[in-house]
Image (cartoon, rainbow, N blue to C red):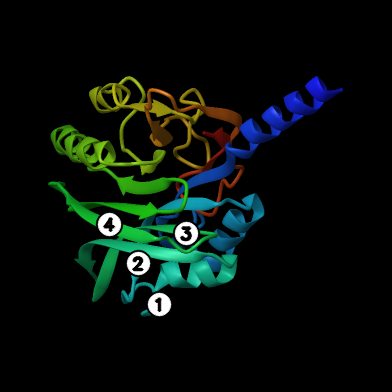
Amino acid sequence: MRKIVLLFCLFAALTASARRLTLMSYNVRNGCGLDGIRNHARTAAVIKAQAPDVVAIQEVDSMTVRSGRQFVLADLAGRTGMEYTFAPAIDFDGGRYGIGILSKEKPLSVARYALPGREEKRALVVAEFADFYYACTHLSLTEADCLASVALIEEVAAAADKPFFIAGDFNATPDSEVIRRLEKTFRILSDTRRPTFPAGSPRETIDYIMVLRRPRGTDKVMKFKVVEAPEASDHRPILVKINSK
């Protein structure tokens, strides 16, 4: 009997040290669907239905003319009941445009970094939580700029003292040099065989959720899906449920 109790206590201690996380990434196209209608309530509904712990958001406006001078990420946060973290990449249309993170918990700290992009500047944002870091990015359309961005991402992640996740629109397919380079440092948690773009009839995988490779860390994927949202954006969101230690 005593042996059974000890085994139960050991199992409880091991499982208690693991945290279940629901991670999401969504290029929201600033709320503009394939029907040409800009509808932030529709975007928020897609996110809220998945009940994620954190969401990496790409292509979002702040106070631009086209968005009616709305702070779109704050609006999405209000509609989903989440905290928001914004990282502008460029000045645009009287306001700013970039990426962000929605999260159930308020971040302990936030760091923002500028990334290169010839067609437009890009950004990386890293939010720190009690047990992990969650980073969001939207890489350049130019491979050389993407590879330069990867070097900076690797440098930032190397300083992490807890699990480091990164998600976003990498503008690179699984067989690209960009993704091959990232896979040396990160493990892809999302299923690269499941296309995410374009949303109406996906043919390419360019959206990913990854974790920094750790010598003693384990991140077991419990579930992955490409969310059925064919109209709300030109990308379909992706979601991963994991046990992280």
Residue sitting farthest toward the right: 1
Q: Residue at x 87, y 22 (%)?
A: 1
Q: Amino acid at mark 2?
A: Asp
Q: Amino acid at mark 3?
A: Leu
The tag earlier along the polypeptide, 4 or 3, is 3
Q: Quadrant of residue 145?
A: top left
Q: Say if residue 135 shows up in the picture.
A: yes
The residue that mark 1 highlights is 70
Q: Amino acid at mark 4?
A: Ala
Disc 2/disc 1 C-alpha distance (Å) = 8 Å
Q: Nearer the viewer, mark 3 or mark 1?
A: 3
Q: Mark 1: give few (<14), some (14-19) or many (20+) Cα within 10 Å.
A: some
Disc 3/disc 2 C-alpha distance (Å) = 14 Å
Q: Nearer the viewer, mark 4 or mark 1?
A: 4
Q: Position of residue 90 (x, y in %)?
A: 20, 62
The residue that mark 3 highlights is 102
Q: Residue at x 58, y 51 (%)?
A: 52
The residue that mark 2 highlights is 61
The residue that mark 4 highlights is 111
Q: Residue at x 52, y 33 (%)?
A: 245
Disc 4/disc 1 C-alpha distance (Å) = 23 Å
Marks 4,1: beta carbons within 8 A: no
Disc 3/disc 1 C-alpha distance (Å) = 17 Å
Considering the numbered disc 4 on the image, is that residue within a helix, a strand or a loop?
strand
The tag earlier along the polypeptide, 2 or 4, is 2
Disc 2/disc 4 C-alpha distance (Å) = 19 Å
Marks 3,1: beta carbons within 8 A: no
